[in-house]
Amino acid sequence: MKLRDHAGVLPTALFAIALIGVCLWYGYQDLVFRPPQSIHQWRQSDCASLALNYHQHHLGFIRPHTHNLTSDQGTSSACAPSEWPLLYWSVSCFYHLLGPDDSNYRIFNTLLFLMGLLFLFRWVYLIVGDAFWSLLVTMLLFSSPVVAYYGNNYLSDSAALAFSFAGWYFFSKYLLRGGSKYWPVSLFAISACLKPGALISPMILAALLLNPRIIGRRKIVLPHRLQLRNSWPLLLVPLAPMPWIAYANWYNRIHDCSYFSTTVFPIWNYTLKEIADYLQHMVRLWGDQYFHPATLALLVMAFAWTLWPGSKSGGIWRNACLWGALGCTSYCILQFQALADHDYYVLNLFIFPVLVMIALLNGIRQHHPGIYSSPAVKVAAAGFVLFNLHHAANSLDFRYKGWPNDRDANAAYASAKLALRAAGVTERDTIISLPDRSHASLYLLNCKGWTLYTDARFNRSAPIPYNQDSVGIRRSVERGARYLFVLGTNFLESSDYLRSFTTRLVAHDGEWYLFDLRDGPANFQMSQEVPSAVYRCDAENLTPDGVHFMDAVSGKAFEGVNLRTDSFSKSGCYSVHLTNERPFGMTLRVSVAAGGERLRMEVWRKVGSAEEAIPIVAVPAKGVYENRARVIREDDGWQLLRLDCRLDAEAAGGLLELYLYNPGSGPAWFDDLSIFRYWSRETGR
């Protein structure tokens, strides 16, 4: 049997073998058993939360809820995403049959995505008629780290992309062989309902249908079936997500919910400097996660070659590339700000590189058959794809085993969930979970409640903070909070406002604590540590030689006098001005105390400074690097940042470096740095 057999059975079988091999290479067989974690754990947890709430509370399809009680003035969990909740509701149906396990969600969504890759392979094979090139196009798409990561995940974006590929396959079949036009209509509609961003594909088809004169300028004649009188049902697909978007806006409005975005964040809402900063942020953070840079360069050249008249790459696929470029650009303009921190927003843009590769291969096949069938070219292409698959595998490994994934916290939540159930805490009890600023912990503990979340209200009204001071905790108690869950002894001991709420300990294991918020006999008291040493740098006092800042009380010297400025100040006349070129300031170097210690850094940062600018605790020789500062207060245009860090006995004697750091593209101003040191009880000091 030849690889180009009529039914395509053998090529499909070989594709399936290759796909299984890549999935094993990526470690999908292990990843499907993991709860939400790593990059965008928050959004993963939201998706899983919607499905679990459908199952646990027997909700109707049009009544989506999550675990966070931030709707109806902080009393309910009613909130609707911008997409039809088809995936989440379908998963809840599987939960009724198989049980509410994260692996059931991951496996279901992964199978949908892999089905999409199968249809992608068959789509390319239908156009170019060569199994080898069809396999390479599919695997090159699968070698995108962001595609590989979300293809085995909780978000509906990957499922939407999968249904888009299926829609393109049946559209091409309709175009070339006279199949039913209603299959692509249905599949594109499902895709758009799963994620409105998937409308890019039906919009491309609508453009092809409605603009024959533009296409005709190149003397390209539309296939008979791709005439408006035959294919007008395709024009109805963009209407598919509209009813739910309208309903979701109404549903969120009556519940005073601003949790899920049902709007856009267009580029014209931002200044030129903000646009430049966002673009730099995207390149630095996600640049090699869309594709390896070499692949991005190759795709740009392929698109340019497709547009070049001398390439003789004409026909419908060339024009689909043109409209795809316009559609993707429009999408990026409308969702500009969201793209900066949400790599999954680009998933439905991946239809564009596929169209580029199809147009490229189709043009080479027709006009350069020698290159198309060259064994040397095929070997080189296969090696290039393997190189990209290796890049994706390394990226996945980094996302799950590197710093983006807080494995210690995830393990703590997993053990705490079992302990909470043993202590009698059920999924119907409400908790305050700290210090989580997302809502991932609520899902991981399977308890409804509140966190340190700040409801930004899409920056269109005053933000609403939750549980960030004693007043916030009291407000949550009035709303029905029964338990307080705290992860991290360091956070517990350093958050003085929790003292009156942490007297009734219910359960404790390692770094997590569970307290009963109801009145009753006390059985726990937070330690009231007094700092053993305090160092301050106010940018005013200098050493006699003027080379360093000096703490007038402790006599400690801080580096970075050359960064002093009188442009702004929180107190006195001076602050320090940090830029990307001169990013370090107010540096103090001391030795770590014997037995270990706890540190707290507090510093005022000017509002409008680069958000990346933060205080740092580092012990370079021991690989300690702590940068998780949080804003605890604002006053007169300044934000007070606090960073808490615990150093164990293994770091004793190492050189402790405390400093301010600005890796951002914009400037930052700091003033009034305070450092508090608490010796470990083991030191006897």
Image: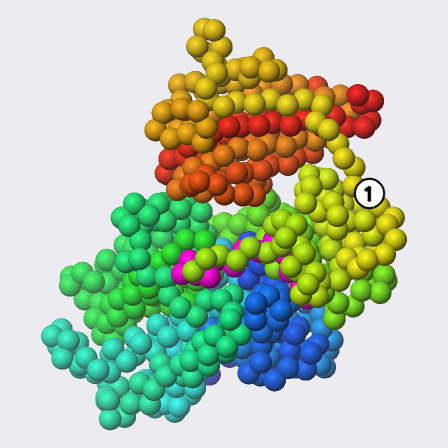
The residue positioned 47% from the left and 25% from the top of the image is 585
Using the image as rendered, state which of residue 455 and residue 38 is in the foreground. 455
Using the image as rendered, state which of residue 607 and residue 123 is in the foreground. 607
* Magenta span contains residue 214: no
- Residue at the far top in the pictured view: 545
Tell me the amino acid under the disc marked 1: Gln
Q: How is the image coloured?
A: rainbow
The residue positioned 43% from the left and 70% from the top of the image is 262
The relative height of residue 374 versus residue 217 in the rendered view (above or below) is: above
Q: Residue 605, percent across and down?
A: 46, 36
Residue 384 appears in the rendering: no
Q: Quadrant of residue 569?
A: top left
Q: Residue 387, percent across and down?
A: 47, 50
Describe residue 587's horizontal placement relative to residue 655 as left or right.
Answer: left
The relative height of residue 549 versus residue 177 in the rendered view (above or below) is: above
* Magenta span contains residue 449: yes
The relative height of residue 527 versus residue 536 in the rendered view (above or below) is: below
SS at mark 1? loop
Q: Quadrant of residue 309?
A: bottom left
The residue positioned 35% from the left and 72% from the top of the image is 200
- Neighbour tally class for label 1: few under 14, some 14-19, many 20 plus, Cα within 10 Å: few
Q: Which residue is mark 1?
A: 525
Q: Magenta residues, as a range?
A: 446-460
Q: Residue 301, percent across and down?
A: 27, 54
Q: How many marks?
A: 1
- Residue at the far bottom in the pictured view: 229
The relative height of residue 598 versus residue 46 in the rendered view (above or below) is: above
